[in-house]
C-alpha cells in the first residue's frame, strides 16, 4: 500500500515527543515572514501612550521573575505592553484556575485551551470568534499554516490559534551490538522482528550466561506501533481515525486489525515481549532498555540520545550501541506509526469580552503577530541576538548563555515554532536522529480534529478497548470473538455515535468527499 492512499500530508508529527521538548524553545529565524509587527503596533498605539497591560495564563514551569525575564522585557519594549504571564506547573491546577476565572468573568486576555475547553467555552459564548479578525492576523495565519488554523475551528468559526506543527520523535531502537554478537540484521519486516526479538530472549545477547533479557519492551500497546504500521494500521492504545480510498477508517475496523493482533499474540506467546509491558508507565520501558534488559524499544530520540541518557547507557555497558530502525514493510505498507495531524502542541483563545476593549484586543493580536514574525519569532525561540545567539549567514549559532537562560523561552511561543529548524540548533549533536525520526513514513491520523459527542465517554470506551485487546494478545480471549467485542463497544459504549460524529467532522474539513 502506497502512502498516497492516505490523507495528503499537512503536518509533521506527535508525542508524543512534543511534551519532552516543550521547554527547549522554538525554531527558525522567521526569515520567510515579511510583515513587520511593529508597523501594526503603531496603528494600535493607545491614546494615552501608556503601556497596555496584557494578562496571559498557561501551563508551564521555569518562568523567572519579571526583572529577570528578558523575553518579557523585549516584548514589552517592542509592543508598548506590560505583559503579565502566569504559568501553572500542574495541568489540573491550571484547569481549575481557568474554570474559576471564566465562571467569575475574570477573563485573562489570552489563555491556553485544549479541545474540550474550546468546545465548552465557545458553546457558552465566552470566546471571541477570530474569523472576522483574520486579515489582522495575517502574519500569524502565514506562520502556523491553514492546517493548524483548522485545529482551532468549531462550527465554521475560529475560536483559538493553534501552534505551528511539530514533528514525530518515535521509532524502534535496537541494540546493534546484540545484533552483531548473534550475527543478525536489523529487522525490515514483522517476521524478521519476531525472529530477532526471539533471539534476544533466548540466545544470551549480553553474554552473561543468564536468561535475563527479552526482545521487546515499550509502553503498553505503544510497543507495537511499528507492527501495526506494517499492517497499514495506526494504533497506539487509542483507536485512530484515518482515510483510505476516500473513506474514514477507524483502526478497530481496519480489515487488517485481527491479523495484526494475531501476529502480536504470537510474539507475546513466544516470551520475547516484556512480561510487564501493559503495566509499564512513565519511562519504565526506557529504563529497562538502558539497563540492558531489552534489545528493542519503541521510544523517542531524546530519551535515548540526550547526554544524560547516553551516560546512563554507557555506565551499564560501554559497548552498548542503540540505533534507529526504519519503518518495517508488511501487508499494509511501510509505516512506523500514525501521526495525528489534528493534534497540536497548544492553542490560545481570547475572551469575547475583549471586544469591549479594542485597544487591548489589538495589542493581543499584535503580540500573536509579533511572535510569528521575523523579529519576534527568533526572540521567543533563541533569545536576544548577540547575547543568546549569533548569526553565521542565516545559520543560528547558540552562545553558552542560551543554554543557561533559555529554558523558559518556549513559554512565549504562543504560535509555536518551525520545529526542525529549532531542534537542529538546540540539539545539533542529535540532528541525525531527529531527521531520521521525522522522515519516517507515518499514517496521517485525524483524531485531533474530532470532538466527542454528548453521551460518549471516551475514557470509559478507551479503557474497555485496552482491556479487551489485551485479552486478545495474551490469549485470554479468542480472536474469533473480535466481532462480538465490536458489537459490545457499539452497544454499551455509544461508540457508533462517536464514529458518526467523527465522519461528519472529517467530511466538513474536506478530508473525505
Image: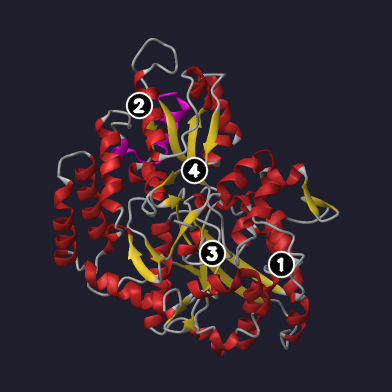
* Side of 225 relative to 163 (left or right): left
The residue range painted magenta reads 277-293
Q: Which residue is mark 4?
A: 171
> Which image quarter is the C terminus in?
bottom left
Q: Are marks 3 and 4 in contact (CB under 8 Å)?
A: no
Q: Which residue is mark 2?
A: 198
Residue 462: name its quadrant. Answer: bottom left
Q: CA distance from mark 3 to mark 2?
A: 36 Å
Q: CA distance from mark 2 to mark 1?
A: 57 Å
Residue sitting at x 54%, y 64%:
9
Asked if residue 278 is among those painted magenta in the image, a careful observer would answer yes
Numbered label tally: 4
Q: Which residue is mark 3?
A: 9
Mark 3 secondary-structure assignment? loop
Question: Is 4 in front, or is 16?
Answer: 4
Mark positioned earlier in the residue sequence (3 or 2): 3
Q: Position of residue 132 (x, y in %)?
A: 57, 89
* Side of 390 relative to 235 (left or right): right
Residue sitting at x 37%, y 82%:
123
Q: Nearer the viewer, mark 3 or mark 4?
A: 3
Q: CA distance from mark 2 to mark 4?
A: 20 Å
Question: Is 54 in front, or is 374?
Answer: 374
* Side of 501 relative to 423 (left or right): left
Residue lying at the far right of the rendered structure? 393
Residue sitting at x 36%, y 60%:
240
Mark positioned earlier in the residue sequence (3 or 1): 3
Q: Which residue is mark 1?
A: 75
Q: Nearer the viewer, mark 2 or mark 4?
A: 2
Near mark 3 (Cα within 10 A), the count class, few <14, some 14-19 or many ≥20, is some
Mark 1 secondary-structure assignment? helix
Amino acid at each position: 500500500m502506497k502512502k498516497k492512499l492516505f490523507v495528503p500530508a499537512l503536518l509533521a508529527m506527535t508525542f508524543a515527543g512534543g511534551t519532552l521538548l516543550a521547554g527547549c524553545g522554538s525554531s527558525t529565524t522567521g526569515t520567510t515572514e515579511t510583515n513587520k509587527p511593529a508597523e501594526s503596533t503603531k496603528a494600535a498605539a493607545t491614546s494615552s501612550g501608556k503601556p497596555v497591560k496584557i494578562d496571559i495564563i498557561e501551563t508551564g514551569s521555569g518562568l523567572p521573575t519579571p526583572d529577570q525575564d528578558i523575553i518579557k522585557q523585549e516584548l514589552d519594549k517592542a509592543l508598548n505592553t506590560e505583559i503579565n504571564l502566569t504559568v501553572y506547573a500542574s495541568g489540573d491546577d491550571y484547569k481549575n484556575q481557568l474554570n474559576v476565572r471564566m465562571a467569575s468573568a475574570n477573563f485573562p486576555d489570552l489563555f491556553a485551551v485544549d479541545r474540550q475547553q474550546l468546545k465548552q467555552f465557545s458553546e457558552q459564548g465566552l470566546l471571541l470568534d477570530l474569523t472576522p479578525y483574520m486579515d489582522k492576523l495575517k502574519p500569524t495565519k502565514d506562520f502556523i499554516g491553514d492546517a493548524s488554523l483548522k485545529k482551532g475551528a468549531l462550527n465554521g468559526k475560529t475560536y483559538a490559534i493553534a501552534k505551528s506543527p511539530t514533528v514525530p520523535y518515535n521509532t524502534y531502537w535496537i541494540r546493534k551490538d546484540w545484533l552483531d554478537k548473534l550475527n543478525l540484521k536489523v529487522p525490515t519486516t514483522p517476521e524478521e522482528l519476531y525472529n530477532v526479538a526471539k533471539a534476544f530472549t533466548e540466545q544470551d545477547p549480553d553474554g552473561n550466561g543468564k536468561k535475563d533479557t527479552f526482545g521487546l519492551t515499550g509502553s503498553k500497546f505503544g510497543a507495537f506501533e511499528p507492527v501495526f504500521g506494517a499492517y497499514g494500521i495506526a494504533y497506539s492504545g487509542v483507536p485512530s481515525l484515518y482515510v483510505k480510498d476516500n473513506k474514514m477508517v477507524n483502526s478497530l475496523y481496519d480489515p487488517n486489525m485481527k491479523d495484526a493482533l494475531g501476529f502480536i499474540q504470537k510474539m507475546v506467546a513466544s516470551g520475547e515481549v516484556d512480561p510487564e509491558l501493559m503495566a509499564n508507565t512513565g519511562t519504565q520501558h526506557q529504563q529497562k532498555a538502558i539497563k540492558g534488559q531489552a534489545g528493542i524499544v519503541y521510544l523517542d530520540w531524546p530519551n535515548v540520545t540526550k547526554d544524560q541518557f547516553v551516560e546512563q547507557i554507557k555506565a551499564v555497558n560501554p559497548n552498548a550501541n542503540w540505533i534507529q530502525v526504519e519503518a518495517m514493510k508488511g501487508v499494509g505498507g511501510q509505516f512506523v506509526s500514525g501521526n495525528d495531524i489534528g493534534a497540536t502542541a497548544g492553542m490560545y483563545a481570547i475572551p469575547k469580552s475583549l471586544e469591549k476593549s479594542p485597544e487591548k484586543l489589538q495589542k493581543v493580536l499584535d503580540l500573536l503577530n509579533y511572535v510569528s514574525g521575523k523579529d519576534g519569532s527568533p526572540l521567543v525561540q533563541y533569545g536576544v541576538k548577540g547575547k543568546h545567539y549569533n548569526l553565521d549567514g542565516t545559520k543560528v549559532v547558540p552562545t553558552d548563555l542560551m543554554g543557561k537562560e533559555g529554558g523558559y523561552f518556549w513559554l512565549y511561543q504562543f504560535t509555536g515554532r518551525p520545529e526542525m529548524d529549532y531542534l537542529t540548533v538546540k540539539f545539533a549533536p542529535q540532528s541525525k536522529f531527529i531527521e531520521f525520526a521525522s522522515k519516517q513514513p507515518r499514517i496521517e491520523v485525524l483524531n485531533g480534529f474530532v470532538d466527542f459527542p454528548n453521551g460518549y465517554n471516551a475514557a470509559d470506551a478507551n479503557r474497555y478497548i485496552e482491556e479487551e485487546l489485551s485479552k486478545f494478545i495474551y490469549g485470554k480471549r479468542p480472536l474469533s470473538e473480535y466481532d462480538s467485542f465490536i458489537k459490545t463497544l457499539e452497544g454499551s459504549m455509544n461508540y457508533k455515535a462517536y464514529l458518526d460524529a467523527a465522519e461528519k467532522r472529517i467530511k466538513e474539513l474536506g478530508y473525505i468527499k
